[in-house]
Amino acid sequence: MALRFYSWPKSSGTRVHWALEELSVPYEVVTLDRAKGDHRAPGYLAINPGGKVPALVDGEQPYFESLAILLHLAETYGPRAGLWPGVGISARAEALCWSVWGMTEVHPYMMQYLYHGLDTPVSYAPDQRSKATASYNHGQLLRLLDALNERLATRDHILGAFSLADIPAASTLLFGAGLGLKLEGRANVERWLERCRARPAFTRVTA
């Protein structure tokens, strides 16, 4: 099998798993046992030197970092599946930009707000939280949600039809929503997330 996907449940590997299911390509899932230290084994460190999940091996080529894996899958398999614009299509630039935006903007601001501003299983202990950090990151997150809400005012998904460009931001915000993150009246984002949540590929991965 050409694709071997390394992950464990309820991790950042979920977004890659979602993409693999959407693409309908054959792949093998290798579930690492964190408690046993599988992610620190020499064989796995040769694939992902950071000792984290996810990782992917396509043929003989290893990839790590979820966004890098997503972009590789998108560029390699997405056009054929109708889930990524091909080379020379102007929408490809939008797909790249919004994908990177979802991981490098939405994800870090949301996580810092969860750590410092809410009571969730991933939050810091109350005496380790910073109100200033919570306030700043919440403000930045709301700014990004406003931009996304505007983008979705005239379309069902980021590029119009669903594509792999939806996955970075959607996977982040669905994780946050599950921990109590509120979208605070941004109805277009709420409807988009529900459409993403209802996709059979996402349901299969998170069931």
Image: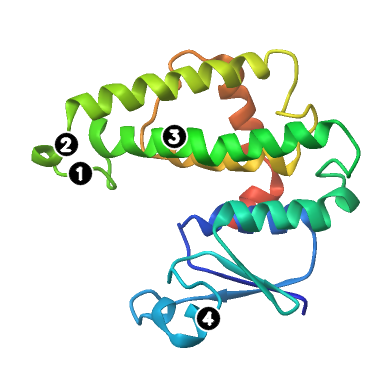
Instruction: Please name the residue that numbered disc 4 is placed on.
Output: 46
**Where, by quadrant of the figure, is residue 69 drawn?**
bottom right
Locate residue 116: give its quadrant: top left
Q: Measure how far apart labels 3 and 4 are at the Cα level.
A: 35 Å
Observer-nearest residue: 58 or 172?
A: 58
Earlier sequence position, callout 3 versus callout 2: 2
Q: Are marks 2 and 1 in contact (CB under 8 Å)?
A: yes
Residue 170 shows up from this direction: no
Mark 4 Cα within 10 Å, few/some/many (few <14, many 20+)? few
In front of the other: 193 or 146: 146
Give SS at disc 1: loop
Q: What is the crowding at mark 2: few (fewer than 14 residues within 10 Å), some, or many (at least 20)?
A: some
> Which disc, if any, is residue 124?
1
Q: Amino acid at mark 1?
A: Tyr
Q: Name the residue tied to disc 3.
A: 177
As drawn, is 118 to the left or to the right of 50? left
Please give left or right for residue 93 compared with residue 43 in the image: right
Amino acid type assigned to the residue bearing label 4 in the image = Ala
Viewer-nearest of labels 1 and 4?
4
